[in-house]
């Protein structure tokens, strides 16, 4: 012990289990517990007699003032102080001070009791940090938290929850009010039931519900809850609350848009489909389903063209798909022919547009097809009609020329002969000219008769066609031509079936048969017996009558164009008038038929007459 | 009267042939007038003349619409013949078909021979005018 110290450490104080010092009024250490020395690592020899503020260097001035207050304090109650001890790292101590009084209740110093509260202090700090983190999280995410204490029936909510409810920061929540804010019916029933389930069974839940704010606004919220346990028992429910009105609205809007798009796609009078890179359908609309004859898109999804269409068609389609996906160039408005597995054929106007992914490569394609089969049909009908019309027109012009030419040539002759007659003096010559005038007159009459016949054929296109057995007519014509055939030693070989029937105008068929048969005999080869072969076949809606002879033949290169023309003759025969084939052709065409010819000079000629089976 | 060595009439209508012959007898002096009923007979006749070392006819009256070989087909062959003299071909027709007029224009360009197009009826004065050496 150093001599300056008059007081020895009190043994009672020395043994105190906590760090404790007794100071005089100058706050010089009089007694101290061993724990005090060990806790603060003070040297026992240098501690006694030293003022407390010299021992603890990091004490604030305000602390020293406080100690004075304790000395003068009449009550014996101590107060709390914090201090930082620098000797053994950062530590927090709680100082409990009380006045030290002698037997006469006179204050002779201060008793200071040191309690290490570092751990508590750190925990508090940690809690504060967590709390502020939670607050920040709530504020940023706009997700509120709430906590219901079942035992004390107390509901605590964060500011975000208050914001959602639309109440002030000092508003006191009650469990019943909080539940009552949910919309009557499904929402309120659900929240009540879920909270009850948590309290009774510890259930965790998450719901989307409708909710009315304090301002009367109806919003959608996401609310979730879970139990709070204490010693294994459920003591409360805690959870989150989030205003999801915007998300729900967006979601609804998206759903609406989706519905709109779907309705649009489904009701477009076009076949719409989306295919993946393997050309499998991943979306089809109603029109496509209707066309494919299925009730549900499920019957088509995942299937490729090879599953649905004729193989050849599928190959073409797949090649198109690949081209579009490789080049990323859309195929627009291409006319395609489609044949389904069951053989239905349709013409489409198809577009294929590549669908590109984030990597810039095609992930599939959108296809749009319009069924233009009806249009094509109409187009064909129109084309046929134009053909008929232009043919008729051609015939008309041709006929006009024939009429004009024939009449003009006769009148020119009349005019010339009359001119001669007027100026002729010679009586014999006059008689000669009159003879020629008579001849010209006869020619004109004959021409008019012929033209009349042609006009009759072309103006009677509406004469009814009747089914007639071809052989019956052939027999009849043969009977009429019997003498002519016998005289020429001609032979007719008929291989037409007894049942072959043609739809014709009865008077025309006789004339046609008569004409071809007499022509075949008339233009027979001088070196052989004329033989005429008759046969019939059926071909694309026509009965084709073939009349084949072994006669002179016609040089079609030279005369083909004119063969069926009026007043065209090709053989130097005195009885060829050049009118027969022209009339025959007109009669055949008046029955919607046609006639073709094949011939080789010196061998013979074959005419084919096409009788239309339709009306 | 104009003197022509040889004339040829190609027409299947005897009345027209009679008419042309009669008018020719009034307007020209010609001892050699040949008549053919169609183009084929005419081309054969002309070829035969050449074989016999005779000159081709100096003037030809040609009808268009004829059997076997018509006027145009005749001209097709005629212009290929290797003749010593230029020939005047007078087409005599009642046709007013533009197709025929077009054909005439085409033939005029294709040949050295003179080709005229004359619509019926024709008069004596007109025959006199077109019956010349080309």
Image (cartoon, coloured by chain):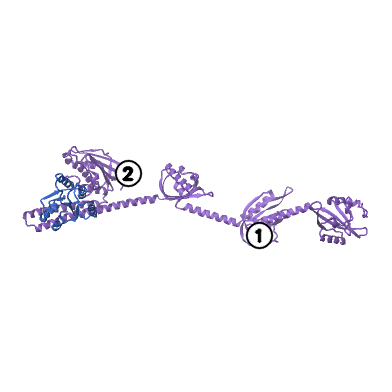
Q: Is there one chain holding both mark 1 and mark 2?
A: yes
Q: Colour of chain B?
A: blue
Nearer to me, A545 or B21: B21
Q: Mark 1 lies on which chain?
A: A
Q: In this view, does A101 lie to the left or right of A559?
A: right
- Mark yes or no: residue A606 visible: no
- In percent of width and height, residue A288 lies at 46, 48
At 31% across and 47% down in the image, what residue appears?
A614
Identify the secondary structure beneath mark 2: loop
Q: In this view, does A357 lie to the left or right of A409?
A: right
- Mark yes or no: residue A344 visible: yes
Distance from the alpha carbon under mark 1 to that under mark 2: 84 Å
- In percent of width and height, residue A181 lies at 65, 58
Nearer to me, A402 or B11: B11
Nearer to me, B104 or A503: B104
Q: How many numbered callouts? A: 2
* Position of B51 relative to A242 (above/below): above
Image mark for residue B130: none
Q: Outermost residue, front direction?
A: B84
Q: Which chain carries label 2?
A: A
Q: How crowded is mark 2: few (under 14 residues within 10 Å), some or many (20 or more)?
A: few
Q: Residues within 10 Å of mark 1 (few under 14, many from 20)?
A: some
Q: Colour of chain A?
A: purple
Nearer to me, A503 or A302: A302
- In percent of width and height, residue A43 lies at 87, 51
Q: Do the residues labelled 1 and 2 touch (CB within 8 Å)?
A: no
Image mark for residue A540: 2
Among numbered discs 1 and 2, the one appearing first in the sequence: 1
Identify the secondary structure beneath mark 1: helix
> Which residue in the protein does label 1 denote?
A163
At 35% across and 50% down in the image, what residue appears?
A380
- In percent of width and height, residue A315 lies at 44, 43
């Amino acid at each position: 012990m150093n001599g300056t110290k008059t007081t020895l450490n009190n043994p009672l104080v020395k043994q105190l289990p906590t760090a404790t010092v007794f100071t005089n009024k100058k706050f010089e250490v009089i007694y101290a517990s061993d724990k005090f020395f060990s806790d603060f690592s003070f040297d026992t020899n240098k501690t006694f007699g030293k003022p407390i503020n010299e021992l603890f260097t990091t004490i604030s001035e305000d602390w020293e003032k406080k100690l004075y207050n304790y000395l003068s304090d009449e009550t014996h109650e101590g107060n709390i102080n914090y201090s930082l001890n620098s000797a053994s790292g950062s530590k927090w101590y709680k100082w409990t001070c009380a006045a030290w009084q002698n037997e006469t209740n006179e204050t002779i110093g201060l008793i200071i009791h040191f309690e290490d509260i570092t751990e508590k202090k750190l925990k508090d700090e940690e809690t504060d940090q967590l709390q502020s983190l939670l607050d920040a999280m709530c504020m940023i995410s706009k997700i509120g938290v709430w906590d219901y204490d079942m035992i004390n029936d107390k509901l605590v909510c964060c500011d975000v929850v208050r914001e959602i409810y639309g109440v002030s920061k000092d508003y006191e929540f009650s469990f019943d009010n909080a539940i009552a804010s949910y919309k009557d019916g499904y929402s309120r029933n659900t929240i009540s039931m879920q909270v009850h389930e948590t309290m009774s069974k510890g259930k965790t839940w998450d719901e989307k519900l409708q909710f009315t704010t304090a301002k009367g606004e109806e919003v959608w919220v996401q609310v979730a809850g879970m139990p709070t346990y204490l010693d294994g028992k459920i003591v409360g429910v805690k959870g989150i609350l989030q205003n999801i009105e915007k998300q729900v609205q967006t979601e609804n809007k998206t759903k609406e848009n989706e519905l709109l798009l779907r309705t649009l796609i489904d009701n477009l009078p076009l076949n719409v489909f989306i295919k993946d890179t393997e050309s499998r359908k991943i979306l089809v609309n109603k029109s496509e389903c209707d066309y494919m004859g299925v009730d549900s898109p499920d019957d088509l999804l995942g299937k490729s063209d090879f599953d649905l269409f004729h193989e050849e068609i599928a190959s073409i389609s797949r090649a198109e798909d690949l081209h579009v996906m490789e080049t990323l160039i859309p195929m627009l408005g291409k006319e395609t022919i489609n044949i389904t597995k069951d053989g239905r054929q349709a013409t489409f106007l198809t577009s294929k547009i590549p669908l590109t992914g984030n990597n810039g490569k095609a992930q599939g394609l959108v296809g749009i097809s319009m069924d233009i089969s009806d249009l094509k049909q109409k187009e064909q009908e129109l084309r046929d009609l134009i053909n008929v019309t232009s043919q008729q027109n051609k015939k008309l012009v041709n006929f006009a020329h024939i009429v004009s030419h024939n009449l003009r040539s006769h009148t020119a002759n009349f005019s010339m002969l009359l001119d001669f007659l007027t100026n002729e003096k010679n009586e014999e010559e006059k008689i000669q000219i009159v003879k020629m005038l008579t001849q010209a007159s006869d020619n004109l009459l004959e021409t008019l008769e012929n033209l009349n016949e042609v006009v009759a054929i072309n103006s009677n296109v509406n004469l009814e066609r009747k089914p007639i057995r071809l052989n019956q007519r052939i027999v009849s014509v043969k009977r009429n031509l019997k003498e002519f055939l016998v005289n020429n030693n001609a032979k007719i070989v008929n291989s037409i079936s007894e049942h072959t029937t043609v739809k014709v105008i009865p008077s025309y068929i006789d004339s046609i048969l008569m004409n071809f048969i007499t022509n075949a005999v008339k233009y027979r080869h001088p070196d052989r017996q004329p033989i005429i072969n008759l046969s019939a076949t059926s071909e694309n809606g026509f009965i084709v009558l073939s009349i084949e002879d072994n006669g002179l033949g016609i040089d079609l290169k030279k005369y083909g164009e004119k063969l069926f023309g009026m007043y065209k003759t090709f053989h130097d025969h005195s009885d060829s008038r050049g009118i027969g084939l022209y009339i025959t052709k007109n009669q055949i065409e008046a029955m919607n038929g046609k006639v073709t010819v094949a011939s080789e000079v010196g061998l013979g000629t074959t005419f084919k007459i096409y009788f239309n089976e339709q009306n | 009267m104009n003197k022509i060595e040889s004339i040829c009439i190609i027409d299947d209508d005897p009345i027209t042939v009679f008419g042309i012959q009669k008018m020719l007898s009034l307007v020209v002096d010609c001892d050699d007038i040949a008549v053919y009923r169609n183009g084929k007979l005419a081309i054969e006749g002309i070829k035969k003349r050449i074989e016999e070392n005779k000159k081709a006819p100096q003037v030809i009256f040609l009808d268009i619409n004829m059997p076997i070989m018509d006027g145009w087909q005749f001209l097709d062959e005629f212009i290929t013949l290797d003749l010593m003299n230029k020939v005047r071909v007078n087409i005599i027709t009642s046709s007013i078909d533009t197709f025929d007029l077009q054909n005439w224009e085409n033939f005029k360009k294709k040949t050295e021979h003179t080709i005229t197009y004359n619509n019926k009826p024709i008069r004596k004065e007109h025959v006199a005018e077109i019956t010349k050496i080309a």
